[in-house]
Image (spheres, rainbow, N blue to C red):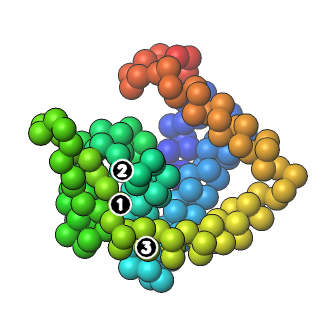
């Protein structure tokens, strides 16, 4: 990270911004790795499996079109296709024809519903312990607002839109 920090300094990151960015990257990586290992170790499902299962479990009738899942997860079409194929092979989801034969819905199976129902409470417990309690009740709203501002800022930008002055 030292080489990156040196180059970042040339790109106008203040020491405070660099510290925050590095802390964010470290936290995100460590938290996601830990949560994904817990899912795999305790329940035999991957983080991506869980993300798909949660999206389907929250959808009306436990069904979505692949493009809707891609939009929700921000995954490329090929990644989604491979993920859904692997999950279907394990009985977590199934493809179901619709009135339009060109398209299929992805449907949460009973096995998939059982997996998300078993996994969600332990996952929420880990998120509470490792994230919410670490951030602290008094800082959760502020943290959420900061995350929302960053998300909003990324919505209007395309890759390559930034000038050398750091402005969009």
**Image coordinates for residue 12, horizontal then vertical, percent:** 60, 27
Left or right: 103, with 75 as reference point: left
Q: Residues within 10 Å of mark 3 (few under 14, many from 20)?
A: some
Q: Are marks 1 and 3 in contact (CB under 8 Å)?
A: no
- The residue indicated by pointer 2 is 63
Picture coordinates of residue 125, whole percent (x, y):
66, 72
Q: Nearer the viewer, mark 1 or mark 3?
A: 1
Q: Would residue 79 be seen by someone viewing this image from the given angle?
A: no
CA separation, marks 3 and 2?
A: 16 Å
The answer to whether residue 90 of the structure is visible from this angle is yes
Rendered location of residue 7, percent (x, y): 50, 37
Q: Quadrant of residue 132?
A: bottom right
Residue placed under numbered mark 3 in the picture? 115
Question: How far is mark 1 from mark 3, CA to CA?
Answer: 10 Å
Contact? badges 2 and 1 (CB < 8 Å): yes
Query: SS at mark 1?
Result: strand
Between 72 and 147, the one lying in front of the other is 72
Q: Which residue is mark 1?
A: 108
Q: Looking at this rendering, what residue extends furthest in the bottom direction?
A: 42
């Amino acid at each position: 990270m030292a080489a990156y920090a040196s180059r970042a300094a040339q790109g106008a990151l203040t020491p405070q911004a660099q510290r925050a960015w590095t802390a964010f990257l470290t936290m995100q990586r460590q938290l996601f790795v830990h949560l994904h290992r817990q899912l795999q170790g305790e329940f035999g499902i991957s983080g991506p499996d869980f993300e798909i299962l949660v999206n389907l479990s929250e959808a009306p009738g436990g069904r979505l079109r692949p493009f809707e899942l891609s939009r929700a997860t921000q995954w490329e079409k090929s990644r989604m296709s491979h993920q859904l194929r692997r999950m279907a092979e394990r009985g977590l989801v199934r493809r179901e024809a619709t009135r339009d034969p060109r398209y299929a819905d992805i449907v949460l199976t009973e096995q998939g519903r059982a997996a998300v129902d078993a996994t969600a409470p332990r996952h929420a417990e880990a998120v509470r312990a490792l994230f919410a309690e670490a951030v602290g009740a008094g800082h959760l709203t502020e943290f959420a607002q900061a995350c929302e501002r960053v998300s909003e800022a990324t919505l209007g930008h395309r890759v390559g839109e930034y000038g050398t002055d750091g402005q969009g």
